[in-house]
Image (cartoon, grey):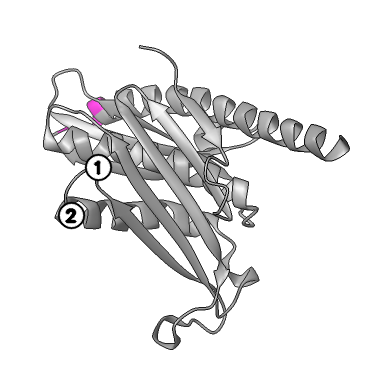
Amino acid sequence: MSPPTALLSPLPMADGSAQYTDGPTTLLASINGPIEVKPRDEIPLEAYLEITIRPSAGVTSVREKHLEALLRSAISPLIMRTVYPRTLLQITLQIIQHEQASAACTLHTLLASAIVVVVLALVDAGVPMKGMLAAAFVEEADGSAAHVFGYTVTGGGRDPSEGLVFVESDGAFDEKGFVEASEIGRKRCLEVGELMKNWVREKVGKDMRYRLK
């Protein structure tokens, strides 16, 4: 399988955007904000986070709503929402392409890719964050369980295990299986994290060259 690819700023009218492809999954994320918030959603000391996921075909279903909730739990702690009190931050995720065998794997592979593409879009929008988050999907060998692991992306020499900030699991598994899966997830997150840093560096380099012309 070819390595994941990403493109930052594919949507010029959005405040920030990114497109991410990993195998059969391609997602497009856009960020708009901070913008004016409806009075009912206003939070006095921080920005209100609105996440919308659109399927590749048809109307939004329970799957997308569940994915929105999982994505919020992963992304919300990263964003420094107190910087923009009484405002709205909109995150829109479009599923362009996705193919997976089982329902559990479908949700978890989508979640891992969604975390990556939304973080890239947030970086592109210049939204203040506590750090970047890389995510990876891991399925146990017998197919009995699926996991998504999220690790913070750092540039220092800190033990990578300290950066585990998100886990979502589904299926039947024991402690041994989970530990083995978490080690695979850690390695994959480190690989994805390096790719994310490279994509951001390339985007910054292109922007700097454009401004200097």
Q: Residue furthest right?
A: 212
Query: Which residue is label 1 attached to?
Result: 56
Of the numbered discs in the image, which one, if any, rests on residue 59? 2
| Residue 199 percent across, percent down from the top left | 61, 29
* Region rendered in magenta: 173-177
Which residue type does callout 1 highlight? Ser
Q: Which residue is depicted at the point 60% across and 47% down?
A: 123
Circle 2: element type: loop
The crowding category of the residue bearing disc 2, from other C-alpha atoms within 10 Å (few below 14, some 14 to 19, many at least 20), is few
In this view, the residue in front, 24 or 186, is 24
The crowding category of the residue bearing disc 1, from other C-alpha atoms within 10 Å (few below 14, some 14 to 19, many at least 20), is some
| Residue 159 percent across, percent down from the top left | 58, 31
Which residue type does callout 2 highlight? Val
Q: Which residue is depicted at the point 38% across and 25% down?
A: 22
Please tell me whether residue 201 belongs to the stretch shown in magenta. no
| Residue 69 percent across, percent down from the top left | 30, 58
- The quadrant of the rendering that contains the C terminus is top right
Q: Which residue is depicted at the point 25% across and 42% down?
A: 56
In this view, the residue in front, 53 or 160, is 53
Q: Is residue 23 left or right of residue 55?
A: right
Q: Is residue 204 left or right of residue 198?
A: right
Q: How many marks?
A: 2
